[in-house]
Amino acid sequence: MAMVGLFWITEDAVYVGAEPVAVSALPAVSGGIHLQVERELSAVVLERLADGGASVGDLLAWRRGQADDSTPRRAESEALLRKWSGE
């Protein structure tokens, strides 16, 4: 399982915190270990997932392509969030 922004991504599921991503956008958690930009981008990704502008399959495809369960470093994580948010 790898963490990207506020998302936990396994080979077959995407979670926000402890909850599976559903069809409605969930607010990003404030504070914690994430930078403001990560929270904002995560919220945009959630909105895109909810309105059909992004696919959970994109997140799962990224995870399946990883050699191990390591979480990407902050710069890579931010780049993935930007990609998934449509920036």
Image (cartoon, rainbow, N blue to C red):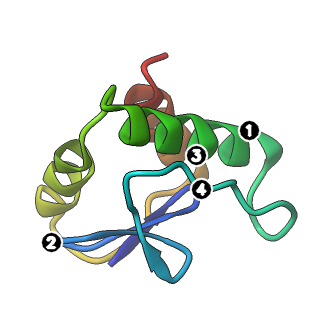
Up the image or down, 24 lies above or below 11; here it is: above
Whether pointer 3 and pointer 2 mark residues with C-beta atoms closer than 8 Å, the reply is no
Which of the marked residues, 1 or 4, is nearer the chain's N terminus? 4
Residue name at image x 44 percent, y 59 percent:
72
Q: Position of residue 39 (x, y in %)?
A: 70, 48
Which of the marked residues, 2 or 4, is nearer the chain's N terminus? 2
The kind of residue tagged 4 is: Leu
Residue name at image x 83 percent, y 60 percent:
30
Judging by the rendered image, the residue that carries numbered circle 4 is: 26
Q: Position of residue 62 (x, y in %)?
A: 21, 50
Helix or strand or loop: what does disc 4 sit on? loop
- Depth check, mark 2 against mark 4: the one in front is 4
For the N terminus, give its image quadrant: bottom left
- Depth check, mark 3 against mark 1: the one in front is 3
Judging by the rendered image, the residue that carries numbered circle 3 is: 42
Which of the marked residues, 3 or 1, is nearer the chain's N terminus? 1
Which of the marked residues, 3 or 2, is nearer the chain's N terminus? 2
The kind of residue tagged 1 is: Val
Residue name at image x 51 percent, y 37 percent:
47
Whether pointer 1 and pointer 4 mark residues with C-beta atoms closer than 8 Å, the reply is no
* Furthest residue in direction front, as rendered: 24
Residue closest to the eye, 54 or 83: 54
Q: Which mark is residue 16?
A: none
Q: Counting other residues with Cα less than 10 Å from the Cα at mark 3, is it few (<14), some (14-19), or many (20 or more)?
A: many
- Depth check, mark 3 against mark 4: the one in front is 4
In the figure, is residue 75 to the left or right of 83? right
- CA gap between label 2 and label 4 equals 20 Å
Q: Counting other residues with Cα less than 10 Å from the Cα at mark 1, is it few (<14), some (14-19), or many (20 or more)?
A: few
The kind of residue tagged 2 is: Asp
* Furthest residue in direction right, as rendered: 31
Which of the marked residues, 3 or 4, is nearer the chain's N terminus? 4
